[in-house]
Image (spheres, rainbow, N blue to C red):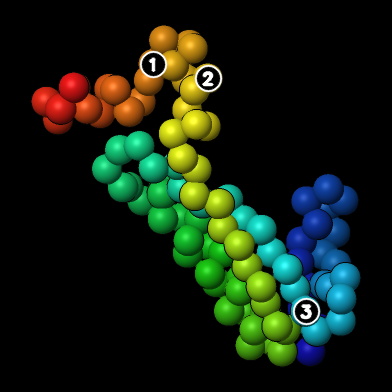
Amino acid sequence: MALRFRNTLTGNTDEFKSIEPGKVRLYTCGPTVYDYPHVGNWTSYVYWDTLVRVLAINGYDVNRVMNITDVGHLTSDADDGEDKLEKGARREGKT
């Protein structure tokens, strides 16, 4: 049975074909960690883990890399007046 995914660009459901037969290389976004974890942080883990497992069950050799965003990504937030790390530290009394 072929794997089929919804193509959000076209609105069609297309058969999945990997670039390299039998192998899938996958780069996914992970959480931006600057506060207590919440359900939204774990959504990326659950979603992508499910996809990797489905691909593996269907015979693909999956190589997955997940980005974990560090504080460098938050620089623009500070430029706009809110440094999320500082805000969390103040809340915890650790400034």
Q: Residue at x 41, y 10 (%)?
A: 81
The residue carrying mark 1 is: 82
* Mark found first going from the N terminus, 3 or 2: 3
* Mark found first going from the N terminus, 1 or 2: 2
Q: Please name the amino acid that badge 1 sits on.
A: Glu
Closer-to-camera residue (10/31): 31
**Residue 62 falls left or right of residue 10:** left
Disc 2 is placed on an element classified as helix
Q: Which quadrant does the C terminus fall into? A: top left
Closer-to-camera residue (53/22): 22
* Mark found first going from the N terminus, 1 or 3: 3
Query: For residue 76, which numbered disc appears in the image?
Result: 2
Q: Which quadrant does the N terminus fall into? A: bottom right
- Residue 57: x and y in percent read 63, 88
Pointer 3: residues within 10 angstroms few (<14), some, or many (20+)? some
Residue 15 visible in the snapshot = no
- Residue 54: x and y in percent read 62, 79
Disc 1 is placed on an element classified as loop
**Residue 93 falls left or right of residue 8:** left
> How far apart are labels 1 and 3 at the CA level?
42 Å
Closer-to-camera residue (43/73): 73
The residue carrying mark 3 is: 23
Q: Please name the amino acid that badge 3 sits on.
A: Lys
**Residue 4 falls left or right of residue 93:** right
